[in-house]
Amino acid sequence: MTDKQLKTLKNRLAVAGAWIAACIFFFPIFWMVLTSFKTEAQAIAVPPLLFFEPTLDNYLEIQERTNYTKFAINSVITAFGGTAIALLIAIPSAYAMAFNTTKYTKDILMWMLSTKMLPAVGVLMPIYLLAQNLNIFDTKILLVVIYALMNLPIVMLILFNYFREIPKEILEASRMDGTSTYNEIRQIVMPLAWGGIASTALLSIILCWNEAFWSIVLTTTEASTLTAFVASFQAPEGLFWAKVSAVSTLACAPIVVFGWLAQKQLVQGLTFGAVK
Amino acid sequence: MKSLRNTALGLTLGVAGASMASMASAGELTIATVNNGHMIEMQKLTPVFEEANPGITVNWVTLDEGTLRSRVTTDITTRGGQFDIMTIGMYEAPIWGERGWLQALEFGEDYNVDDILPAMRNGLSHDGNLYAAPFYGESSMIMYRKDLLDAAGMTMPDNPSWGHVADAAAAMTDKDNGVYGICLRGKPGWGDNMAFLTTMANSFGAQWFNEDWTPALDSAAWNHAVHFYVDLLNNYGPPGSSGNSFNEILALINEGKCGMWIDATIAASFVSNPDQSQVADVIAFAQSPQAVTTRGANWLWAWSLAIPAGTNQAEDAQKFIEWATSADYIELVAETNGWGAVPTGTRQSTYDNPNFQDAAVFADAELAAILSADPENSTQNPSPYVGVQFAAIPEFQAIGTAVGQQMSAALAGDVTVEEALEAAQEAADREMRKAGYY
Amino acid sequence: MNPTLVRWLQAPSIIVLFLWMIVPLSMTIYFSTIRYNLFYPERTGFVGLQNYEFFWTDAAFFPALLNTLILVGSVLVITIVLGLAIAILIDRPFRGRGIARVMLISPFFIMPTVSALVWKNMMMDPNNGLFAAFANALGFTPIEWLQSVPLLSIIIMVSWQWTPFAILIFMTSLQSQDQEQKEAATLDGAGFWAQFFNLTLPHLARPISIVLLIQMIFHLSIFAEIFVTTSGGPGVSSTNLTYLIYIQSQQAFDVGVASAGGVFAIILANIVAIFLIRAVGKTLTV
């Protein structure tokens, strides 16, 4: 074999490996979607069925039972709201820290991260009682605030790193031109960091969307999100494999599609577009 | 101090918080319920109630059993007032009633409270007050494949012994063809494996607590029962039993993989439904097996509707409960979906109805099981607690779950039965000591 | 920027996070020292360290601690190694790469409860599951995943969910690697591994740190996967600290003991953090 042949072979193997990995990782999702079009009897068939006559019954029954749209809207509002507030607080802070790093900066960031380590069940009662006393139980505002606080440390950390990647020379050059801090952020930093902010936002939205603990514990009817919607179909008395697959498909579809669509943004964000 | 903390958090939460509070408006009932089939049907029929009672609208909060339980318990113990009606079980009703967290239910003549099966009324009462109205009730019984048993040349008496059940399981097992003689719960949890295992232990003469409230898991009866359970499932049970609960086994039996199953009577309507079960026409029923005593061999449970003491809509809530647990409601379901689909286990009149007897092949066995269950006398020797498959004390959930974990470890073969029971006894003793029983 | 402005810009995040930490934390610490069981509102009073002692002497405490560390450690190793390998595989362009990439990162968007239900019922079930079907087809006895290897099963589920996160971060960082440098190295005759250790790995140092940190935080409090699949069993073989606290707070409704458990969990998290963050944190700052 010549070197060139060897190289082609290696390339082919790598491509094959990539596809195998992709299929393995995607398979459970594919199977879940497939199961959602089965009847309950088909869903538990042994050996598992790959070919069958698809039915929409599961989706119709879900439609009949619950108000998917309301849960979905709540999920959208709380996930985007929480992310927006987290970004609003984090962008100026992370910016300030990235361009004025002191010996305390690292400690502050690490301390912020350590607040994420409070296990939710451990602080359930304090938060629960506070929400009750403040009369904001079962409101979207409460979830938005909790989600914002929950993700703030991670948003800070990632943004800090993005801002630090921006070459200081560019800023120094603009400062020499007498640009104000406000304009500096608006005209130079934001365009450069835009991709980074977008990808941070995406990560935060996904984390909020999938948050199941607080959304179930702190809501009843007004602010329940899709995770509560899933919980209302999880493990009932009787067969539920097909129905729960349909519910899960409905609950995950928006965020998966959103993730796919925003992928370009995400990739750009993580690579800093033209900066490198 | 408290107000200081609140102010501090109030600042973080932003000013908008308080004004956005969701106050339950008048005429709007918020009902927390579990996602079982009968409750889903109740949700679908709610418009009928709303039409008959103009001005009342109903909001449903549906959750899975475990989540619902911790959710409503947190709400009622902190006087949260999020719900106007809660769906609770026979375990919660007497405990919460005793603590004054539930409103006692008083019904009018029309409701005919005496029609409710006495075992259900007793299990949901404390000090003679009814604290929850049963929506549907269940006991446990044997469901078995008559075809397999016939092929083995055996029969199933109405009241079999555990020895007979083991023989039948051995005769029906055909592992090469994926048929297992018996399927039983194994997933840890006080409402999962321990619900079943407690009834089994009861029939072996065991009990959870002695008269002085010391845990009795170190008794010979428990040892005997758990050995029997572990051997039975290891020899004739399906693989992965320690992860199985109701749904997993239902899937197995519907696929024709189990010879026998001892579980909730509600399962009878699923396994005898040809739409989802391959063995619908060969399933037969018998009472739960007995060993040294007939007491406590089958459990008793009722999903019931209760009104938390804090609600300011007690009147409307009472109206809804009267509607949902009435004989008329049962007829309404029958008209809509047929008599085979009505919520059972609550009223004598249901079982007296010839239409129901025709539609439900399991009717007789279910009624016999429910009537034979007595929460007040469920153990061979006297015990200080109420409840067949649980002890109605607040500590039981944690104890039952800790013990359930040990039992599943014994079933998985990680520890011996003796080690498991010893650890279980120790865990139970710790909880009881902490709670100050002795 | 002048120092005052810097301070003003930093203040909001520090203040809100400080409140978010101190308010629940002080309440938790306070609750952990009093008698506070939701079922017995009449029993009150200071109990000192009794709640801590109760939690500490639970036979499940050390197994749970160990399980927590094993869970976090193995998931970190698996996701980073697999994530790196796959990210390198899909770094070169090939037809349909966009689709492969979408397939690879999708699991990260799935809710943990949903992922647990799918894995438990459709993949790992020893009777109806797909793995069992494959094993039977090949003539093997199906593995009883959740019974024989409960912790490993949980590790697989969590890794399935989080490897895509690692892939995502590594994949995008790889694209910013200096291609000219790589080509030069190839011309110099540097093999794949030499390039990997000398060029790729140093380039990925910071992304690896981010992946480590973020994952560690989430994995210390894994709950949904355990709650849905094994309920912590058989025995306590898949109980982690979070699940143990859950049992105290949501089954025993003992806020005092659960709070003590919460304080233990915070201490553990901070010990882990000090070691790990100090180690990887270097690449994060100046």
Image: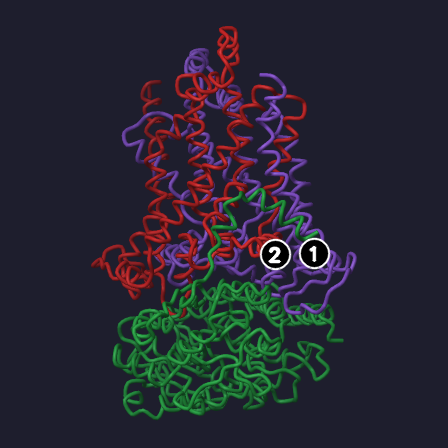
Chain colours: A red, B green, C purple
User: Percent x, y for residue B335?
Assistant: 25, 81
The residue shown at (26%, 72%) is B275
Which of C10 and C249 lies nearest the eye of the viewer?
C10
Q: Pointer 1 indicates a residue of which chain?
A: C
Disc ID at residue B411? none
Q: Is residue A159 visible?
A: yes
The residue shown at (46%, 30%) is C170
Residue receiving disc 1: C31
Dot 1: few (<14), some (14–19), or many (≥20) neighbours within 10 Å?
Answer: many
Q: Is residue C223 above or below residue B11?
A: below
Q: Is residue C240 visible?
A: no
> Which residue of the protein is positioned furthest toward the left in this rendering?
A53
Q: Is residue C196 above or below residue B128?
A: above
Task: Quadrant for the N terminus of chain A, please.
Answer: top left
Q: Is residue B120 above or below residue A136?
A: below
Three-letter code for the amino acid on which mark 1 is drawn: Phe
Cβ–Cβ below 8 Å for labels 1 and 2? yes
Residue receiving disc 2: A125
User: Percent x, y for residue C22?
Assistant: 66, 44
Q: Is residue B297 above or below residue C236?
A: below
Which of C34 and A263 lies nearest the eye of the viewer?
C34
User: Percent x, y for residue A74?
Assistant: 39, 49
> Which residue of the protein is positioned furthest toward the right in this rendering?
C48
**Marks 1 and 2, how far apart at CA:** 9 Å
Which of B348 and B52 lies nearest the eye of the viewer?
B52
